[in-house]
Image (tube, rainbow, N blue to C red):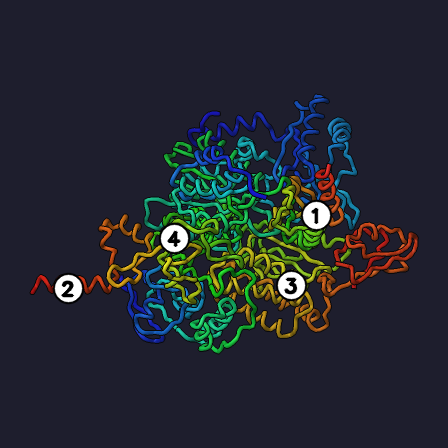
Amino acid sequence: MERRFKINDIDVKARAGEHLLDVARRYGFEIPSLCHHEALPPIGACRICLVEVAWGGRRELCTSCNFEVIEGMQVTTDTPAVQHHRAMNLELLLARAPGSARLRELAAQYGVRRTRFGPPATSPLPNCILCELCVRACEQLGNHALTMVGRGDKKRIGLAFNSPSEQCTGCASCASVCPTECIPVKDTAAGRTIWGQTHPLVLCKVCGAPVMTERQRAKAIAKKGLPEEYYDFCESCKQSTASKRFASIVW
Amino acid sequence: MSAPPVDIGRVDRVLARHPAGVQGELINVLHDLQAELRYLPRQALERAASHLGVPEAHLFGVATFYEGFHLEPRGEHICTVCMGTACHVRGAPRLVEQAERDLGIRAGQTTPDMRLTLETVNCVGACALGPLVIFDGKYHGNMTPDRLGRLIGKLAKKGSE
Amino acid sequence: MARIGNAKQLAEYRKQVKASKPESRKAIAVCAGTGCKAFGSFELFEAFREALARHELDRQWDLRATGCHGFCERGPLVLFFPDGMLYQRVKSSDVDEIVQTTLKQGKVVDRLLYTDPQSGDAYIKERDIPFYKHQRRLVLEQNGQIDPCSIDDYIALGGYSALAKALAMGPHRVLDEVERAHLRGRGGAGFPAGRKWKTCRGTESDKRYIICNADEGDPGAFMDRSVLEGNPHSVLEGMIIGAFAIGADEGWVYVRQEYPLAIERLELALEAARAKGLLGEDILGSGFAFDVHINRGGGAFVCGEESALIASLEGRRGVPRRRPPYPAVAGLHGKPTNINNVETWANVPLIVGKGADWFRSIGTEGSKGTKIFSLVGKVNNTGLVEVPMGMPLRQIVEDIGGGIPGGKRFKAVQTGGPSGGCLPADKLDVAVDFDSLTAEGSMMGSGGMIVMDEDTCMVDVARYFVGFLKFESCGNCTSCRDGLERMHELLTDITEGRGTDETIALLEDLAATVKATSLCALGTTAVNPVQSTLKYFRDEYEAHVRDKRCPARVCKALISYTIDNDACTGCTLCAKRCPQDAISGQKKGPHTIDQDKCIKCGICRDVCTYDAVRVE
């Protein structure tokens, strides 16, 4: 089923059940957001992707990431109200993550150069804005090592029982999806250190670059049933080995 | 003070009362485990996770979300100060301050000798009695800081006998 | 206990029960609600039982423990049938005199009657007491009459006849009747129940659920608890009728675990109804099957929000999600689910039994029927009251509530629970219905009504509610989680004397964003207490920030305790009780408080019998 509506007076089309932010971005509209990733279910946490939506005599200020498109609605992406409240929510987040360059830059676009609020009372992970992208990514990958702990002003990101998790494969997807780059991850000769444990790494047999962690490989082998050797090479070496093999066959 | 060991048999008997693999049972399971063990020790939660077929992280996230679940051992006695609105306007904050002062702990904490845990609750619906303190399940209505001080004092005396 | 096979058998069974317990029979009803129990009504009940046996009166007098009568302030309450005499603040030690004087000689024990503190008038009958006289008890009517543990008591008073009627009407006529009655949800938002039911019924699905929301998390509210404790079958009957109309075969009651008595009585009610064939397979021989499970809440206010409640029932963190889709379309386990709260369900048997026209004759244009409130705080008659929609707030506070204790001045009344607004004296004539309260910046909510007097600081109250809500926020939205935390900080600054005019301005600005941009109703209504107090009591905020003064003398940082030498008799009591040893003075001589040591705990003022401790 198709849905037709207008964004900033421009006609757009979407599939029923699609979320407004995804559609808007597809059409090139710029709506900022910090907690959204197109591969993960939206939760509407950061409250930055606000837009104004009017339909059936109603007018609502809402987040576009988790708003299912409605036939005939009119969306405005940058009204004064949207700008005003975005700025306030950015100021609130800036107090949580003053170290994030991306957040500082975004806030500055809305005229927020400093925050009137001090550091939050509970924030064990500096610069974390509690967007849950890491938790959602970890769940989506089937690892379930990370979770939200507590609630309200005490909510935080953490591991079961606050101790290193056997579920964590050290894949670092959480760190790579984090909008404020607040999850510490470090690769050394000993392995990859993340979330309180160090995971030995599988190194590429050709160039020595880290391919993945041993736990990741074990999990991948169990899941996909490919031979262990499949994971011996990094992506680029895998490609060049394959092309050499291909060349020897052809010539 | 380290937590006493957990009797896994008791945990399993509680779990056996709930169907395996049904995530919707989670909160009822946590209630029953807590009723049995007075708090929710890690081993019990790990077994509950495996019984219900949910990741430990998920279960931990749920257990810490709800105020009714205690993941740390609680004292022999529980003193709960009601912080409902009716109690608040009748002076409940002064009761908490009194108890905190007398016991040398903050609300939510347990005395180092594990004798008493001081808790607050957001209304038990006995507003006519406010301000209200519940001492080991018994309701003490129209409480004053002075009376609460004496109530706690009595307990302390018993402890030193 | 045999199953009741059909409507005819139900009527016959009712006749039998009534014959064994005629209405003319003498009965003593001891209130066993949570309030009266806390005042010792359980011991009182036992004392009656023992005395009746000892005096061999147990054949002439029925003794029953009933649900909450509502007049909690005066508990324990004892009601005598059939004439409806009420004794209040009855103690076990009064039982012998009651037996000798009242039961044996038919005379009244005057000192146990309710006496109006203002007029000095004593009242014999419950229905004449001002607290009851102005009420219209429909949902609560049977609370003081029946033993909540006895399904027979409920059936004797016509219980489950509405269910039999509904089964005969068929689902669609029931849906029409509930819609025509214009029953609006009693849980907060006031959404028309009939419309919700029809949406749920109309959604194509192989399975539908209904849920009774008994997660009454509002501090200062105990309406639902009292209905569940006092008349669980009325809620259950409503749910069965609803399930039949909607086409659901499974239901849940999500009840706060802080309400153990309600859970216990509900469990008994479910068992009794199953045994009688009123719940389970083939209900009253109709072929309709429906059963109910109980789920205890984990202790999270936000689970009163329906999508969070569903998450919790599914064994997840109680985090609300964006609606639509509404639960009526996609709810529990993705299936169409109809959620109503306890009081809403309890209204259903009344509507089906007496008809939509009867129900519509009560209340106002937009709000039909009655509403239960828990009237608490600085009011003489704390308790549970049920009034027709549209009654002026003033009548509830002054006539039913009996005004403010100690001759103090009324300051504000907060309706709608922690997210409701505080209305000042000049709004007391507002009609209490869904739309009028919202128009004044408050709301109906689920029915908490908290009265505040001149000794209540409105800034402190706002800070209290924001503190409660930041703690109860699920923590998902930046605006609600961080916004409320920051608002709490700003309010703390004001109450501790660090506030300026800019603090107030920022508070207002922040409140607007929290309201406009939070996902669920917890966030969007959380600012009501702040916005309404800023609107009606701005002078109190300004006194805090400009004069560093708390007009109600509540905010510790802005007050000091001193002893009035003229009034002090030197009894030394305050000095003995002071936890800081901050008070010095000779026996029979004037005492003084060392301001450096004083922690402003107020104990000296509490214990002084000469009213010599002053707060400035």
Disc 1 residue type (three-letter): Pro
Disc 4 residue type (three-letter): Cys
Q: Is residue C150 visible?
A: yes
Callout 1 secondary element? helix
Residue where numbered disc 2 is placed: A244
* Percent coordinates x, y for residue C612 in the rendering: 85, 57
Residue where numbered disc 1 is placed: C130
Dividing the picture into quadrants, the one containing residue C71 is top right
Q: Real-space Cα distance between discs 3 and 2? A: 86 Å
In this rendering, do the residues under marks 3 and 1 share a single chain?
Answer: yes
Q: Real-space Cα distance between discs 3 and 4? A: 59 Å
Q: Real-space Cα distance between discs 1 and 4? A: 66 Å
* Comparing labels 3 and 1, the label whose residue is closer to the camera: 3
Residue at point 73%, 32% (across, down): C92
Disc 3 residue type (three-letter): Lys
* Percent coordinates x, y for residue C86 in the rendering: 70, 38
Disc 2 residue type (three-letter): Lys
Q: Residues within 10 Å of mark 1 (few under 14, many from 20)?
A: some
Q: Residues within 10 Å of mark 2 (few under 14, many from 20)?
A: few
Callout 3 secondary element? helix
Depth order, front residue of B131/B99: B99
Residue where numbered disc 4 is placed: A168
Query: Chain for mark 4?
Result: A
* Comparing labels 3 and 2, the label whose residue is closer to the camera: 2
Q: Is B13 left or right of C527, judged from the image as shown?
A: left
Q: Real-space Cα distance between discs 3 and 1? A: 23 Å
Q: Residues within 10 Å of mark 3 (few under 14, many from 20)?
A: some
Quarter of the picture containing the C terminus of chain B is top right
Callout 2 secondary element? helix
Quarter of the picture containing the N terminus of chain B is top right
Residue at point 70%, 37% (across, down): C85
